[in-house]
Image (cartoon, rainbow, N blue to C red):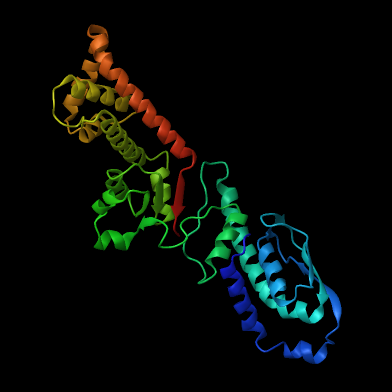
């Protein structure tokens, strides 16, 4: 866990909030020269976070107090396990005690809950991300606790990522995103909205409003969910092919490069299990034209193989390239579920 100059200043304020003009009870009852030891013991199991905070607090209050850590950030601990030991001025230890415990309990709580989520999805290609729902002024520490728990940091604020939410959709235009040169993320509430944004760009991250949306979208048994996922795949693949060959294969043009490209795409999507009517919809054709295109594809392989393959071979390679890119994205694809 890293401690910036900004956090150091905030830790000074945190100590000042509790200590004020001084610990009047300790100053009254304890000799200034009194030395002793203290141990922080866990009341329940969890994941540790806050090593740098403990060091910084005592560096501010009394650098002569010695700290011995029994555990490192990101490591699990059990109930009744000793986490830290302190040795030095009793007055100094008692001055820092409550502020330190407040931080450790909070940060360890975040790390422990994050680890709980991370463990639940560790067998999947999924990462747990945090949000901006943090305690004011303590975002950096809380996001570091997420890392200690095995999660990943999402955007740190409004300044470092374009993230479109419900209110942006209501009062703004998604078309403006086409002018944005970098990546962007969009929160979707249903499959219709997901289909809408799939026309803007390839989907790398989905932010789903509720857990039930995620379950509906990714439930493998749901034919409706599979249908929509195939539609999204088809739209992305066609846009990729168009960008690579410099034409729009959905245009009603009878030149070989257009028709042969459509035949290859039709055949590929049909083999993936896409309905004929859905294939027609993404190519701006009716389902009978799709049937004709698939039949023609098979005929051309036997009657005009060389001429057909000059186009078909290139399109097949592009589809394979697109699939490779999608697979690479899937290896690091992230899903946010906002409860």
Q: Residue 158 falls in which quadrant of the image?
A: bottom left
- Tell me if 22 is positioned left or right of 158 in this view: right
Up-down relation of residue 88 to residue 316 (above or below): below
Report the quarter where the N terminus lies.
bottom right
Estimate the x, y position of residue 321 in percent, counting from the top left: 38, 28
Query: Is residue 201 placed above or below 34 in the rendered structure?
Result: above
Nearer to us in this view, 297 or 212: 297
Q: Quadrant of residue 293?
A: top left
> How many labels sit on residues?
0
Position in image of residue 156 (x %, y %) = 47, 60
Q: Nearer the viewer, residue 177 or 279?
A: 177
Q: Residue at x 19, y 24 (%)?
A: 258
Q: Looking at this rendering, what residue extends furthest in the top direction?
A: 303
Residue drawn at (43%, 48%) of the image: 215
Decide which of 157, 75 is in the foreground and name it.
157
Q: Residue furthest front?
A: 5
In this rendering, would 177 be left or right of 19? left
Query: x, y (%) of residue 313?
Result: 31, 18
Q: Residue at x 40, y 53 (%)?
A: 208
Find residue 62 and report its image quarter: bottom right
- Give the vertical position of 274 relative to 218 (above or below): above
At x 26%, y 9%, the residue is 306
**In which quadrant of the rendered image does the C terminus lie?**
bottom left
Picture coordinates of residue 139, whole percent (x, y): 53, 66
Left or right of residue 285, residue 4 in this image: right
């Amino acid at each position: 866990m890293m401690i910036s100059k900004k956090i150091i200043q905030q830790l000074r304020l945190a100590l000042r909030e509790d200590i004020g003009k001084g610990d009047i009870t300790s100053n009254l009852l304890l000799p200034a020269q009194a030395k002793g030891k203290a141990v922080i013991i866990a009341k329940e199991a969890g994941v540790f976070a806050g090593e740098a905070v403990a060091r910084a607090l005592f560096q501010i209050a009394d650098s002569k107090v010695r700290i011995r850590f029994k555990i490192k950030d990101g490591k699990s601990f059990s109930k009744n396990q000793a986490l830290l030991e302190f040795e030095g001025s009793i007055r100094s230890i008692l001055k820092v005690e409550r502020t330190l415990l407040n931080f450790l309990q909070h940060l360890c709580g975040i790390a422990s809950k994050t680890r709980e989520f991370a463990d639940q999805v560790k067998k999947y290609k999924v990462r747990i991300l945090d949000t901006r729902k943090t305690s004011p002024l303590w975002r950096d520490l809380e996001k570091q606790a997420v890392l200690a728990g095995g999660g990943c940091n999402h955007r740190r604020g409004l300044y470092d990522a374009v993230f479109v939410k419900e209110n942006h959709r209501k009062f703004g235009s998604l078309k403006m995103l086409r002018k944005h040169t970098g990546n962007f993320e969009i929160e979707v509430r249903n499959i219709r909205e997901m289909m809408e944004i799939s026309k803007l760009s390839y989907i790398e991250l989905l932010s789903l409003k509720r857990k039930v949306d995620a379950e509906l979208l990714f439930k493998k048994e749901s034919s409706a969910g599979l249908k929509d996922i195939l539609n999204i795949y088809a739209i992305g693949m066609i846009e990729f092919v168009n960008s690579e060959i410099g034409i729009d294969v959905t245009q009603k043009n009878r030149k070989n490069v257009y028709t042969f490209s459509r035949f290859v795409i039709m055949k590929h999507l049909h083999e993936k299990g896409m309905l004929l009517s859905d294939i027609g919809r993404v190519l701006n054709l009716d389902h009978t034209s799709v049937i004709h295109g698939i039949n023609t594809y098979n005929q051309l392989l036997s009657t005009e193989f060389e001429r057909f393959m000059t186009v078909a071979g290139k399109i097949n390679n592009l589809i394979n390239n697109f699939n490779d890119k999608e697979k690479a994205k899937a290896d690091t694809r992230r899903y946010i579920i906002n409860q």
